Amino acid sequence: MSERPVFITDLSPSQVGELMASFGQPSYRSGALLRWVYQKRASSFDAMSDLPRDLRVRLGEKLTLSSVSEIELRTARDGTQKVLLVLWDGRSIETALIPSAKSQFTVCVSSQVGCAIGCPFCATGQQGYERNLASSEICDQVLYFARRMEGGETISNIVFMGMGEPFANYLDVMVAVGRLNAEWGFGIGARHITISTAGHIPGIQKLGKEKLQVGLAVSLHAPDDLLRNRLVPMNRKYPLGKLIPACDAYVQATGRRVTFEYAMFDGINDSMEQARELAHLLRGLNCHINLISANPTAGCTYKPSLKETAMAFEAELARLRIPVTLRRSYGGEIDAACGQLKSRWGGV
Ligand code: SAH
Ligand code: SF4
C-alpha cells in the first residue's frame, strides 16, 4: 500500500505556521493559505493566486489538497445528492447533500468506514467496521460539496448521520468539528452542527463537557431495553436506565435539548402502547422526538410503518405533551436516506 499523504486539512493553524516558517515565508501567509482552503475552497494549490508561484509549487510537493476523491455522484429528483468518495488507502465512504431551505444545504458526513455497532436495519451496520476516519477525511467531505456550490448557495448545516458511530471516533470528530466551526476554518456555527449517536454514553458525557453549542441527536428507536437490545445492539452496554440520565445530564450541562431519532418499523416499534412507554421514558426531559420513516435496506426484512400508524403514533406522543415531528425522508430514490449509506467499494 502506498504511504499516507499529508493532507492540508490534517494541519492545525500552528502546524501551517511551522510549515510556512520552514519555507522562509512570513506568518501572514499561513492565514492566506487557510482562507484558500476553508473559505475560498480552492480546488488546487495553483489556484491560490495571491501566493507566490514557487510557494504554490512547494506546497503541492509537501501536501495534498483533499483526502477524498469522487468516484460517483448521484442526484435524486428532490435535489439530494450522494457521493461515493475514495480515500488514500482505497477504502470508500459515502456523503450526502440534502437541500434544507432555498439555496441552503445540509451535508451528512461519515465518521467511520463502516460501523461496529451492527444495527440490523442499517446498511452501514450490515457492512461491519473497517476503520475510523481522520479529521481531515471528515472536513474534506464538507469541502468536497462546498467546492461544488454555485453562486448564492451555502452549506448551512452539518450532521454526523452518515456512516459510522461518531463517538467511537471521538477525537477526530471533535478536531473536525473545531475546524468546521473555527473562524479561520469553515466558519459554520456550532449550533448548525449535529452529532448523532447510537447512545455512546462516554461520548455524550465528554461532549457535555466541551462547552460547545453542538447539537446532540440520540438514535433511540425503542422504548424498552428488550427491543432496543435487538435494534441498537449498543444498548446492551449502555441500557436506557443509564442512557436517559446521561442525556438529562447533557441537557443540564449545556442548556440544549436533545433530539431523539426514532425510525418507525411496521409492527416492531410503532404500537400505541409503545408510544405511551416512550412518553413515559422521556417524561420531564428537555427533548424532541424525530419520527423517521424507516428506509429499506437489502439485508433487512423490517418494513417501514404505514403512514396512518406513524401519524397515530405522532398524535399520541403530542397528546402526552412530548414534542415530536414526523419527518419526510429525503434521498430514498438514490439510497441516500438514513441508514442506506454504504460504500460499495468497502474493503478494496
Ligand atoms: N451511528 C450514528 C449516526 C449515523 S446513522 C447513529 O446511529 O445515530 C444516522 C441515523 O440513521 C440514525 O438515527 C440511524 O439509526 C438511522 N438509520 C439507520 N438505518 C436506517 C434505516 N434503514 N431507516 C431509517 N433510519 C435509519
Ligand atoms: Fe452504526 Fe448508526 Fe448504522 Fe447503527 S445506525 S449500525 S450505530 S451507523
Image: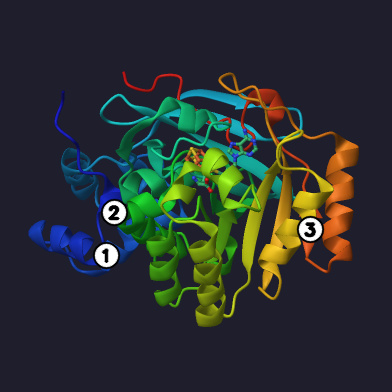
Q: Nearer the viewer, residue 195 or 176?
A: 195
- Where's the N terminus, which quadrant? top left
Q: CA distance from mark 2 to mark 1?
A: 17 Å
Question: What is the secondary structure assignment of the residue under circle 1?
Answer: helix
Q: Is residue 272 left or right of residue 135?
A: right
User: Would you identify the image quadrant in which residue 164 lies?
Assistant: top left
> Going from the N terminus, do you reach mark 3 or mark 1 first?
1
The picture quadrant for ligand 1 comes to top right
Task: Say which of marks 3 and 1 sits in front.
Answer: 3
Give the residue at mark 1: 13
- Nearer the observer, 91 or 74: 91
Residue 204 placement, left or right of 261 = left
Residue 193 image offset from top left, x and y in percent:
54, 60
What's under tag 1, amino acid-wise? Pro
Location of mark 2 (residue): 51
Residue in the picture at 40% in, 76% down: 209
- Tell me if label 2 and label 1 are in contact, CB under 8 Å: no
Which mark is nearer the camera, 2 or 1?
1
Judge the density around disc 1: few (<14), some (14-19), many (≥20) Cα neighbours within 10 Å: some
The spot of residue 253 in percent (x, y) is 50, 81
Q: Secondary structure at mark 2?
A: loop
> Badge 3 is on which residue?
276
